Amino acid sequence: MAEIKMVDLKGQYLRIKNEIDAAIQEVLLSTAFIQGPQVKSFAQALSKDNQGVHVIPCANGTDALQIAMMTLGLKPGDEVILPVHTYVATAEVIALLGLVPVFIDVNPNTFNIEVNQIESKITPLTKAIVPVHLYGQCADMEPIMKIAQMNNLFVIEDLAQALGADYTFSDGSVKRAGTIGDIGCTSFFPSKNLGCYGDGGAIFTNDAELAKKIQITANHGQTVKYQHDSIGVNSRLDTLQAAILQVKLKYLAEYTRKRNEVADFYDKHLANVSFVQTPFRAVNSSHVFHQYTIKTKGIDRDKFKKYLEENGVPSMIYYPIPLHFQKAYSRKQFGEGSFPVTEKLSKTVLSLPIHTEMTNDELSYICDVIKKYHA
Ligand SMILES: *Cc1c(COP(=O)(O)O)cnc(C)c1O
């Protein structure tokens, strides 16, 4: 058996090599490297895939979050609520803009923001909530939207890990991740579910006026060429990446299906392993399995990880150090036990290999290695 990988971007590329190479060639020969026609056509295709939401492509997922917050007019000192168990980018842009990140613990089952704890953190300075759809499953958006409406707060969804996930409301209506709040922000980092071959990102909104403003912020605050009414940034998706994404988008549903097959295999074969808790499936969200993240029970996670590695099974910890313990984001009041669920997760979670090219042989081997572990 070949080496098992966390992600297999090369295998994925080789299956669609002809299409990708042709798309790249076309851009090279056109030399329209910035704002070529593929940027617009990719944005249109992505919009169609996401219930017609307005799509503004940008340079990466972190920029998407920053542009969202700039465009909503958030001002230094404003407070923004976010889960503490997330990738640093979510907190980073808040801090960078002089806003105050207000952390909330996560639900131990879904790994997403603990909705019951949001209201107690709302103050007169609170302006927005940033739910993160972690590992590929939507945060509980219905109650989040209710809290936001009651308190006049913006909702910015971080769907960098959950493009294509569906959330079902209690009335039966279904909305795609990133189309529920005021703005959705996603990333096309190579290892994301829809990844390009460099950096890329996009911003979603259903509000046509807001979409125009977002486009202006992403392009130097420029309304008409060389006319700048507001301070913006330079954040573009380059044409090569758009051309690559346009090809790959056609396969996203298939990729998601494949990821779900891998997850189902793990679920089935790890169900009776006493020291493994397989991922919880929320009833109101589909799962696109950006990560397949287990919780270890009653064993030393790091020793287990080492054992897997020694047996040729890679794994990753998302995230090993909670944000409130990171030097850049720690505060005096954040002692041990400030966010007990997140702190426990940082010691017990482990993400197993999951990607579009995994074989049943690899999966069987991984599950056998796991089952043979003696703590
Ligand atoms: C990847 C990621 C981002 C940032 O995306 P980049 O394109 O790397 O800037 C933001 N939030 C979450 C949850 C992510 O997983």
Image (cartoon, rainbow, N blue to C red):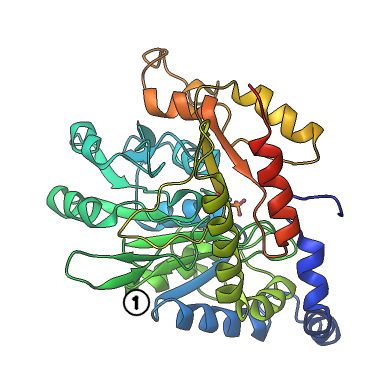
Q: Is residue 6 visible?
A: no
Residue at the spot x=48%, y=51% of the render? 66
- Amino acid carrying mark 1 in the image: Ala
* In the foreground, 5 or 33: 5
For the C terminus, which image quadrant? top right
Q: Is residue 136 left or right of residue 258?
A: left
Q: Dividing the picture into quarters, in which one does residue 146 lie?
A: bottom left
- Residue 281 position in % (x across, y down): 39, 53
Q: Dividing the picture into quarters, in which one does residue 332 lie?
A: top left
Q: Dividing the picture into quarters, in which one does residue 301 lie?
A: top right
**Is 255 rendered above or below residue 285?**
below
Residue at the spot x=59%, y=75% of the render? 254
- Residue 14 position in % (x across, y down): 83, 73
For the N terminus, which image quadrant? bottom right
Residue at the spot x=50%, y=71% of the render? 56
Give the class, few, some or many, for how many residues have Cα within 10 Å of label 1's Cα (few <14, many ≥20): few
**Is 147 rendered above or below residue 79?**
below
Q: Is residue 36 visible?
A: yes
Q: Is residue 158 left or right of residue 201?
A: left
* In the foreground, 131 or 279: 279
* In the foreground, 187 or 359: 359
**Is 266 rendered above or below residue 241?**
above
Which residue in the protein does label 1 denote?
A: 208
- Residue 318 position in % (x across, y down): 57, 38
- Residue 347 position in % (x across, y down): 53, 24
Where disc 1 sits, the SS reads: helix
- Count of marks overlaid on the render: 1
